[in-house]
Amino acid sequence: MLENNSLLTQHSVNRRDFMKLCTALAATMGLSGNAAAEMIKSVGSPQRPPVIWIGAQECTGCTESLLRATHPTLENLLLSVISLEYHEVLSAAFGTQAEENKHRAIERYKGQYILVVDGSIPLKDGGVYCMVAGKPIVEHIRAAAEHAAAIIAIGSCSAWGGVPASGGNPTGAVSLQDALPGKTVINIPGCPPNPHNFLATVAHIITWQRPPALDSHNRPAFAYSRLIHENCERRAHFDAGRFAKQFGDHGHREGWCLYHLGCKGPETYGNCSTLQFDDLGGGIWPVGIGHPCYGCNEQGVGFTKSIAQLANVANPTPRVEKPDVDKPEGGDVSLTAVGLIGGLIGLVGGVSLMTVRELGRQQKHPDDTPKPPREE
């Protein structure tokens, strides 16, 4: 299955661990075992895809998160999965030499490399608030994007504008998509995003020469299709109405829901509550350690709403009318049931009132067999 064992041995990458990595990446995206085998073959190819990583107005948090990934570790990622041609933080070269390396990579791998950008892009006053090699960073990014096979905005700053674009936005900071009109940009938001989401997206591009399925905000659907609130470890407390009211109070110490402390999980999409961070064990994400979700995955939530502002909840629970679990079967029909039957009749016009009555009679007397229809 794996045709390049010599490559893996050369860089001291265990074949078994490499296969586990690809299988885990495929599972993260909800792909089949056959897809995992294709990924193993493609990602393990000696022709590693070149990556050019440009940082704009950022805090290096996205890179720091990648540095702490363990499946794979950074050295295995760079030596066995991708070929990182340019990265200001991780580059051994610096100054003029680093810039020359970037330009050579763009020319050599024209139409083949993946461009990754973290940080927002300032456009005010000609972009002078972020300069590299005497030119605004937006010029470097646009030149690199011109011949990129795929473009990824990693982190909330690159995806939405993030911290630099909040408040008064004095530098005119914009997202990567706004700086590259007409280009398709894959957004992987988060502050920082889980490196596994980034690696899985890159692996998909390597294997099938296209990005994974994207949502309406160009985020990989496998990572951003469900509300964080849906799979939160504190969700049961939310449903039961148990909320921490202050940091350090009884509810907070007992692990109750953090909604009243400003948790934005009910309006933020992401897999933070299920994937968690950097293979450090359970509970390693903001809510797991007792801090409300900040909503950094969501445009207009993170870095826009205040920390204490309550989240919008589309379908609040517990319900206003809780079900009566002690009610005997076959009792009076509740108003809720009447409403459901009315909705059913509206949706399925062919269901008659007599049919509904017959179904109710059978439920009360399951041993009775329906009489055959009378012949005319």
Image: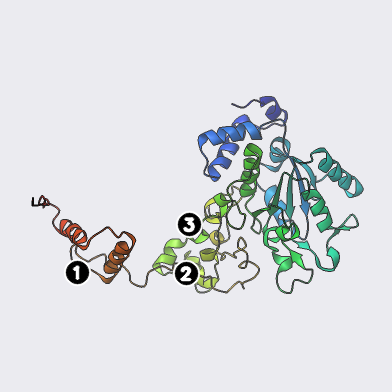
Residue carrying label 1: 332
Q: What residue type is labelled 2?
A: Gly
Q: Which residue lies furthest to the front in this view?
A: 376
Of badges 2 and 3, nearer the viewer stands 3
The percent coordinates of residue 294 (x first, y second) are 60, 65
Residue 103 image label: none
What's the distance in space between the residues labelled 1 and 3, CA to CA? 35 Å
The kind of secondary structure element at disc 1 is: loop
The percent coordinates of residue 31 (x first, y second) are 53, 41
Residue 251 image label: 2
Tell me: 152 left or right of 301: right
The percent coordinates of residue 303 (x first, y second) are 66, 68
The kind of secondary structure element at disc 3 is: helix
Q: Quadrant of residue 172?
A: bottom right
Disc with the residue nearer the chain's start (2 vs 1): 2
Q: What residue type is labelled 1?
A: Asp
The residue sitting at 32% across, 69% down in the picture is: 322
